[in-house]
Image: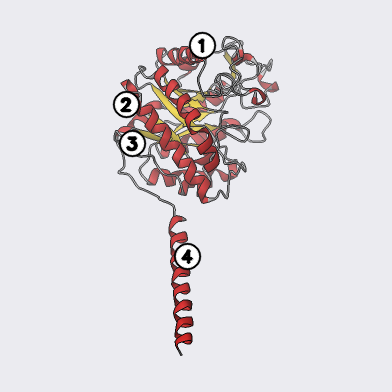
Amino acid sequence: MKKKIGIIIAVFTALIVAACAVVVFWYIGIPKQQVVAESSESRAFVREMGVGINIGNSLDVCDWNNMFTMDANPSTYETIWWNAPITEDLIKMIADKGFGTVRIPVTYMNHIDEKGNVDPNWLLRVSEVVSMVIDNGMYCIVDIHHDTGNDGWIKASKSNYNDNRDKVANMIIQIAECLKDYDDHLILEGFNEMVDDNTRWTDVPYESLSIYNNWNQLFVDLVRATGSNNATRFLLINTYAATCDGRNIDYFELPTDSVEDRLLVGVHGYLKYEKMETGFDNIKKLYDRGYAIVIGEFGTTGDSNVDRVQYTADYSQKAAEIGACPILWDNGSNAKSAAEVTNYAIMDRKNLKWYFPEIAEALINGHKIS
């Protein structure tokens, strides 16, 4: 009889343990969808940013085969992908068109050593471009670009976080120290499109999403600790992979911050025309949680089958409806005419003119909703 009772107790205990395990795994899998009060300061700030444009394939140029060698020449490196260097005249052309924001993607992998020490001459070039943008009355966003992504060295995995945390931290501190005295026209952005070791963009496991949130928290903590204007500067924090994928948005956690209402939330939205409504429904989830939203990249290519002007106008209006700042992706082109442009470029940077002024105007005018 005692033996039967012992077996019953053992089985009952096992069932309790199993049930507890199910509850624990169920709980940790629930997205931590913290809701903040509908902010006035950060949302007002984003409205002031208006609409923007990226100057891509310039300071984000990189060579994935020569990471951590610090042998890149800052004076010529930005031209390796065939774009003209960023000049004051180019920035003025953007400002004169009516843009309020310029995003400057920056890659550091070829300008740091194995410990994450950044070439001061590269930081000087970054600061020169930042000054150009701000001096022309626009907001400037600076990010950490191809150091993440499919071929990047910073990944959303536990092993990568443990192996590279100190190197990344050293790099972030130097970037922040270099730029800390600019006023609020400078927005420091964290990680561009970070993915995990398996380069997953969708159906991402909870652990990868959680580690990514840790990277975001590290970025905020380190920037704030450098003081000066970084203590209260608006910072831009992206979702995992910067996508507007529903799961990535659901599991996004806003970092804790030492100052209230100074974090902006970023996504990238290369949405097909027929998927625009669904995409913005996902982005609106962030808006409904009280966040101020920046759409850091979007656009269509010259060889696409859509009406690029109408697409841009519609996209910009939808962004305006949720108070988001849409920033068009432009990766540059050496095409001799607009008809020859096949990529995302709408600017002729070399000749300082617009391939597609009507797209720029659609972006600006589409954002003006009453």
The residue that disc 2 covers is 231
| Residue drawn at 58 percent across, 19 percent down | 58
- Mark 3 burial class by Cα count in 10 Å: few <14, some 14-19, many 20+: some
Asked whether residue 23 appears in the rendered view, the answer is yes
Is there a contact, CB below 8 Å, between mark 2 and mark 3? no
Q: Is residue 322 left or right of residue 193?
A: left
**Circle 2 SS class:** helix
Tags 3 and 1 touching, CB below 8 Å: no
Three-letter amino acid code at disc 2? Ala
- Residue sitting at the far front: 2
Q: Secondary structure at mark 1?
A: helix
Do the residues under discs 4 and 3 have CB atoms within 8 angstroms? no
Which of disc 3 and disc 2 is earlier in sequence? 2
Q: x, y percentage for residue 344?
A: 61, 27
Q: What colouring does the structure picture have?
A: secondary structure
Cα gap from disc 1 to disc 2, whole angstroms? 25 Å
Q: 10 Å neighbourhood of mark 1: few (<14), some, or many (≥20)?
A: few
In the image, what residue type sits under mark 1?
Asn
Residue labelled with disc 4: 22
Please state which of residues 158 and 79 is positioned toward the viewer in this rendering: 158
- Upstream in the sequence, badge 3 or badge 1? 1
Q: Residue at x 44, y 87 (%)?
A: 2
Q: Based on the displayed image, in which of its 4 quarters is residue 37 positioned? A: top left
Residue 257: image tag:
3
Q: Which mark is residue 121?
A: 1
Which mark sits nearer the N-terminus, 2 or 4? 4
Disc on the earlier residue, 4 or 1? 4
